[in-house]
Image: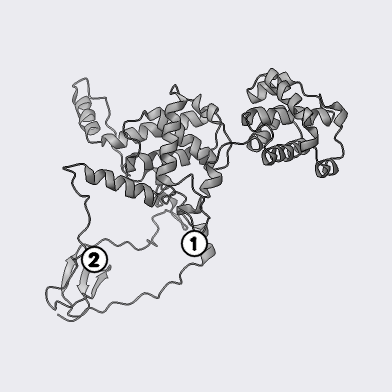
Amino acid sequence: MAPAVVASMPAMKPPSIGQRAKTTNIYAQPFALTDHYKAARSTSNESSAGRKDDFVPELNLGLACPECKADPANLVEVFDSGDMVCADCGMVVGDKIIDTRSEWRTFANEEGDDPSRVGSSNNPLMDGLTEQLDTRISYKDGGSGAARDLQRAMNRGVVPSNRVILDAFDDIQRKCDQVHLPRVVSDTAKHMFKQVEQDQILRGKQRDAIIAAAIYCACKTNKVPRTFREICQLTNVSQKLIGKCFKEMQSAYGLNLHRAPDAGGANGIDADSAVSPTNAVDLVGRFCNHLGLDMSVTKCTEDVAGLLRDKGILAGRSPITVAATCIYLITRMLGQDVSAKKISAAAGVSDVTIKGSSRTLSSLRNDWLTPAILAKYPKFDINRLP
């Protein structure tokens, strides 16, 4: 048999660095296990008896032509005939191969593209959880019960772990919609929950606690500030249990370590700033938005809150209290009297606490009302301080 002649395709130019950055999949393992956690986990697994080794592929096996036995084998896929041919001796070593090239034909009635053959968009979150083709069984069988039996048989074929993840996805989406979180936060929380289940990080913990911890990490990762108290209110789980799940995720995925975007983990997440404790600067913008204040007032309040954080003033108070107190004082000095009761309703802290903290800041006015702040904001009226 004559050797098959196969036309070689021209080599494609590799994408540039900028193109690769634009096409990076945001779900491509953004939460990877740290080496320290892997080492500690492998040590604990080795101590347990009767544990089987994980499955690994056999890399010593390879394809070879049974006729010429060339090493390495020069096998070529001929898509026109659907055969795999040895380019050295011409022997057909395989048939009925699938053509994975692009399809340039159109099946539309008129000229132009055929969008009906494009297919549905790929969802990375559902990769490996659901099949592309779904089967639905109608219950209109005349009451014979055959449809019910078929439905039960199909449900038994679903992997239980996948069903747990899919139910958790619905719960995460419902909780994120309840507190008006954006879509990117819910997608990140879903992916983190899926990663935790696949890595078996939090075995035995309540699902609601894992969901709350995943939502909190997703909020910090995507720079959507939410306090730990707000996330805990979504579930009926204690803050202590949610805190344990959160700390375990930090230890497993290195979220409490500083990683630069180039030398860090996958997807270049700056984990130190992503999961750091919520400070008053992060909350000022949202509280001012709820109160309907101008952007100039918001910017001024953020600067003062950042100065208080750097100097350690009101270090023992919660970030919510510090943010509400800064809004109360700044609005008074700018002549926009916003009542402490109104700020209390927007921030979720009592007006008594706001007034008590404002008196403390008023007594320490020389520490945070620096000449640089007064020169930057000349409209401040210090005499309006309580």
* Residue 272 picture location, percent across and down: 53, 46
Pointer 2 local density, CA inside 10 Å: few below 14, some 14–19, many at least 20: some
Q: Is residue 326 left or right of residue 145?
A: right
Residue 196 or residue 71, whichever sits in front: 196
Q: Earlier in the sequence, mark 2 or mark 1?
A: 1
Inspect the image, locate mark 1, and give the three-letter code of the amino acid beneath it: Arg
In this rendering, which labeled residue sits more in front, label 2 or label 1? 1
* Residue 183 picture location, percent across and down: 52, 39
Residue in the picture at 21% in, 69% down: 84
Pointer 1 local density, CA inside 10 Å: few below 14, some 14–19, many at least 20: few
Inspect the image, locate mark 2, and give the three-letter code of the amino acid beneath it: Gly
Relative to residue 263, is residue 73 depicted above or below?
below
Relative to residue 244, is residue 341 depicted above or below?
above
Q: Secondary structure at mark 2?
A: loop
Task: Tell me the distance, in whole angstroms, between the alpha carbons under discs 2 and 1.
Answer: 33 Å
| Quadrant occupied by the C terminus | top right
Q: Is residue 172 left or right of residue 220?
A: left
* Residue 174 picture location, percent across and down: 47, 29
Q: Is residue 24 left or right of residue 54?
A: right
Residue in the picture at 38% in, 61% down: 105
| Quadrant occupied by the N terminus | bottom left
* Residue 143 picture location, percent across and down: 21, 20
Residue 223 or residue 362, whichever sits in front: 362
Q: Secondary structure at mark 1?
A: helix
The residue at which mark 2 appears reads as 82
The residue at which mark 1 appears reads as 20
